[in-house]
Amino acid sequence: MRKRAELYRGKAKTVYSTDDPDLLVLEFRNDTSVHNGARIEQFERKGMVNNHFNYFFMTKLQEAGIPTHIEELLSKKEVLVKKLEMVPIECVVRNRAAGSLVKRLGIKEGIILNPPLFDLFLKKDVQHDPMVNESYCETFGWVSKENLMRMQELTYKANNVMSKIFDNAGLILVDFKLEFGLFKNVVMLGDEFSPDGARLWDKQTMNKMDKDRFRQGLGGLIEAYEEVAYRVGIKFC
Ligand code: ADP
Ligand code: UDP
């Protein structure tokens, strides 16, 4: 499938149109940003690692009955996907306390959250992705009640599938973010799942193996992503 015009350049990926109006190419770049783009750095191999990471997990989720946008891995940094009408909402599941939850509630990092929490954030960089809830989605028309319920159901299902995979690899899936969209009125998982949008801790050492290494200046970002990929069994082409 040939790439056509560049449609959108986000903080980590570039989106291209293709010859088929229903399909897009996502190119994973080496850029890493925090605070909604306030600090950006490039890391060798990052685009390649996240593209493979995402393809591996989206395939597992698809096999588990979660509809995803994935069509085909095209190259080291590119994947062919269905063009979705994206819902401007981030769905977050939290199995343990970390990040903004710890700051907001003043609780201890790492406490187990049972049952896992489900949070919604509006995708709006200039407002720093504010937290919202179901009634905001309905009132502002970001997504219907029915589709939001489906997004929640699919996010929890993804949590079950991925928590098991990480657990078998000696890792804890602390929290993660997913984005959904509509394809011919069907809710599908879009965007990406990678250590950029998830927290992964080593079960033994509790070492952080995700983007918090960049956020907190711990170093070894890509080495940690590669270690996770190796343990989970992801092969790079
Ligand atoms: P951001 O927009 O947050 O800076 P990225 O750099 O990851 O993020 O850019 C990728 C963009 O592509 C995001 O805005 C995302 O919502 C959008 N996107 C991801 N998957 C699809 C898809 N299947 N169809 C349409 N848009 C998509
Ligand atoms: N997350 C993300 N994109 C965002 C905000 C959060 O991918 O714009 C992910 C983040 O990596 C973590 C989870 O969602 O795995 C929960 O993030 P949190 O609300 O704790 O915010 P953060 O501390 O990451 O700003």
Image (tube, helix red, strand yellow):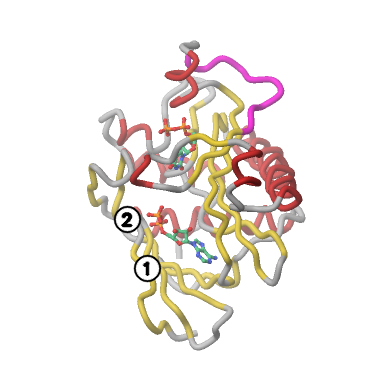
The kind of residue on which mark 2 rests is Arg
Mark 1 C-beta to ligand 1 under 8 Å: yes
Tell me the quadrant of the picture where the C terminus can be found.
bottom left
Whether residue 171 can be seen here: no
Q: Label for residue 22?
A: none
Q: Main secondary structure of the magenta part?
A: strand
Magenta span has 115?
Answer: yes
Comparing 147 with 19, the one in front is 147
- Residue at x-position 60% and y-position 34%: 93
The reply, left or right, for residue 144 in relation to residue 69 is: right
Q: Are marks 1 and 2 in contact (CB under 8 Å)?
A: no
Q: Label for residue 8?
A: 1
Note whether 156 is above or below 64 in the view shown.
above
> Which residues fall within the magenta stretch?
109-118
For the image shown, how many numbered marks are present on the structure? 2
Q: Which residue matches tag 2?
A: 45
Identify the image quadrant of residue 224. top left
Q: Earlier in the sequence, mark 1 or mark 2?
A: 1
Comparing 202 with 79, the one in front is 79
Coordinates of residue 192 in the picture (x, y in percent): 51, 54
- Marks 1 and 2, Cα distance to the nearest angstrom? 22 Å
Coordinates of residue 100 in the picture (x, y in percent): 44, 26
The kind of residue on which mark 1 rests is Tyr
At label 2, counting other C-alpha atoms closer than 10 Å, the crowd grade (few under 14, some 14-19, many 20 or more) is some
- Residue at x-position 23% and y-position 42%: 39
Whether residue 139 can be seen here: yes
- Residue at x-position 49% and y-position 69%: 79
Magenta span has 129?
Answer: no
